[in-house]
Amino acid sequence: MRIGILGGTFNPVHKAHLKIAQTALKKICLDKVLFVPAYKPPHKAIEGKTPTKDRVSMLRLALKGYKKFSVCLFEINKKGTSYTIDTLKHLKKRYPKNTELFFLFGSDQKERFHTWKDHKKLLKLATFVAFKRPCSNKKKNEEFVQNISFKPMDISSKEVRKLIHKKKSTSKQVPKTVINYISQKQLY
């Protein structure tokens, strides 16, 4: 089995997250993609004070209808700081021995990879797959990462939150079910 892992705060989840997962399914022949919402990211704070339950609910709404996508709540249930090493170790134990893990992330994270907890051990647990982001440094290229050609979408959760705050449309950036949830719960 080949499993993709897409972690993040998903604050809120947006269409670029879904496009990365769809592209990974096709280009690296994955059987499924697990979306892993962080409880407390080690390198940044969760902006907007969005409750964890709302981030998870939005993610579940966005993934409805995608048979090969699911939510993994390991980091949420574990509480505390969400380290990739802990998540990958958990998934290695949870799935059969012959399961291959592919950690999907934005290419902008390659520059910070050396700051991740136990970053050298991570490479023994999963193949790291980078997707180009509009803000990434094109000069930086790590040999340990498999790069996927991908037409980047200029979307970020931060930008979505700004648009919502300004009462502007987010229909191009966010799935309709998530827009409705945000409106109903008066988030951001």
Image (cartoon, rainbow, N blue to C red):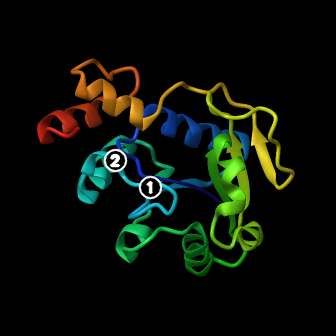
Residue drawn 24% across the image and 55% down it: 51
Q: Residue 1, position in %: x, y?
A: 67, 64
Determine the secondary structure under disc 1.
Answer: strand
User: In this view of the protein, which residue sits in the foreground, 87 or 64?
Assistant: 87
Task: Point out the residue furthest to the right here.
Answer: 143
Residue neighbourhood size for the residue with mark 1, other residues' Cα within 10 Å, grouped as few (<14), some (14–19), many (≥20):
some
List the residue tagged with mark 1: 70
Res. 123 image quadrant: bottom right
Q: Residue 83, position in %: x, y?
A: 54, 69
> Can residue 18 be seen by looking at this rendering?
yes
Residue drawn 23% across the image and 38% down it: 188
Res. 122 image quadrant: bottom right
User: In this view of the protein, which residue sits in the foreground, 98 or 58?
Assistant: 58
User: In this view of the protein, which residue sits in the foreground, 150 or 61?
Assistant: 150
Residue neighbourhood size for the residue with mark 2, other residues' Cα within 10 Å, grouped as few (<14), some (14–19), many (≥20):
few
Query: In this rendering, would 177 be left or right of 113?
Result: left
Q: Amino acid at mark 2?
A: Glu
Query: In this rendering, would 12 be left or right of 101?
Result: left
Residue drawn 40% across the image and 55% down it: 45
> Can residue 175 be seen by looking at this rendering?
no
Determine the secondary structure under disc 2.
Answer: helix
Q: Is residue 82 above or below residue 68?
A: below
Q: Is residue 76 above or below residue 13?
A: below
* Disc number lying in front (1 or 2): 2
Residue drawn 39% across the image and 45% down it: 63
User: In this view of the protein, which residue sits in the foreground, 78 or 92?
Assistant: 78
List the residue tagged with mark 2: 47
Q: Residue 162, position in %: x, y?
A: 32, 28
Cα distance, mark 1 to mark 2?
Answer: 24 Å
Q: Amino acid at mark 1?
A: Ser
